[in-house]
Image: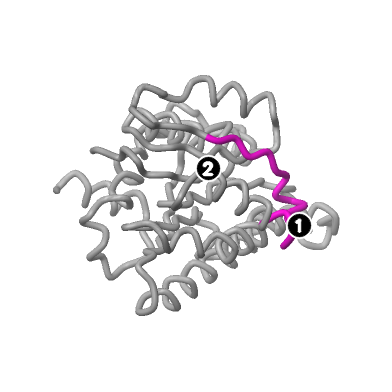
Amino acid sequence: MDLSNRTILITGATDGIGKVLALEFSKLGSNIILLGRDSSKLDKVYDQLDHSFESQKHLILQADLALLSNESAHEILRAITEEFHSLDGIIHNAAILGTMTTLEDYELSRWDEVLNINLRAPFLLTKTLKKILENAAMPRIIFTSSGVANIGRAFWGAYSVSKFGLKGLAEIFANELETTSSIKVFNFDPGATQTKMRASARPAEDPNSLKTPNELLDCYLWFFSEESSDSEDSYFEYADLSKKVTST
C-alpha cells in the first residue's frame, strides 16, 4: 500500500502499538508526526523511522496530554502547519491504565489524569486539528477503544469510564461529520495485544498467548484505504475487521 505524501499524527508513539504503526507507516512513505511526553523515547523512535522516500519528512511533538489545554493544542496545530500543508490522519493511541481499584478507593488526582489523557486530550486535539484535516484528500480520525468501553467491570475505574466516553465521543464526531466533511471517523478496539498496559492490567497472563502489535497493521492500513471510504460503520473490533481485511 502506497502511503507516500500522507501525513499522520500518532499519539503515544513511543511504545507498543503506536511505535509499531509509526515505524511501519513510515516504511510505506508516510510523513509521521510523533507525539509523546518522553523526549528521549521520541528521539529513539524518530531515528528508526524510514527516511528513504523523496520529500518524506517527520516531526516530533513533545507534549504531556494530561496537561493539554486550548493554548497548547493550538501550539500543536501551528507546529504542524509550519511543516505540512495538510494532515491526513490522527491515530489517537495514547492512554494510561490508571489504578486497578474500587471506585470508592480511587484517588481523585489519578482519576483526573486518566480522564485527561484518555478522553479530554483526544477531544481537544480533534476539534483543534479538524481545520488542517479538511485540507487532506482522504482524512481519517481513529480512536482506540477497549472491551471495557462496552460493559463496566469492577476495578477498571477511570480507564473504563474514559473508554466509555471515548466511544461516545467518536460516535458523535462521526455523526456530526458524516454529511458536512470528508473526514471519516473510526473507533477501533484492537483487542488483547502484547503491550505494557495489558501486562500491567493482567500480570498473570501469558503474553505469548496474545497477538503482537504488528498483527494489527493491516487493520490500521484498511482505515486509510479507499475501501474504508464507503464504510457505513464507524466502530470495529479486531476479530471482525481482521476477517474483513483478509477477505479483500
**Residue at 53% over, 51% down:** 92
Is residue 71 one of those drawn in magenta? yes
On screen, residue 20 versus residue 81, left or right, reads left
Q: The disc labelled 2 sits on which kind of residue?
A: Glu
Q: Residue 161, labelled with which disc?
A: none
* Residue nearest the observer in this picture, 141 or 240: 141
Is residue 221 one of those drawn in magenta? no
**Residue at 28% over, 49% down:** 222
Q: Residue 83, labelled with which disc?
A: 2
**Residue at 42% over, 55% down:** 188
Q: Position of residue 221 (x, y in %)?
A: 31, 44
Disc 2 packing (10 Å; few <14; some 14–19; many ≥20): few
Q: The disc labelled 1 sits on which kind of residue?
A: Thr
The part of the chain drawn in magenta is 59-73
Q: Position of residue 34 (x, y in %)?
A: 55, 37
Q: Secondary structure at mark 2?
A: helix
**Residue at 70% over, 43% down:** 63
The residue identified by callout 1 is 102
* Residue nearest the observer in this picture, 27 or 219: 27
Between marks 2 and 1 in the image, the one whose residue lies nearer the viewer = 2
CA gap between label 2 and label 1 equals 45 Å
Q: Secondary structure at mark 1?
A: loop
Residue lying furthest left in this view? Answer: 248
Q: Quadrant of residue 139?
A: bottom left
Q: Position of residue 212 (x, y in %)?
A: 41, 31
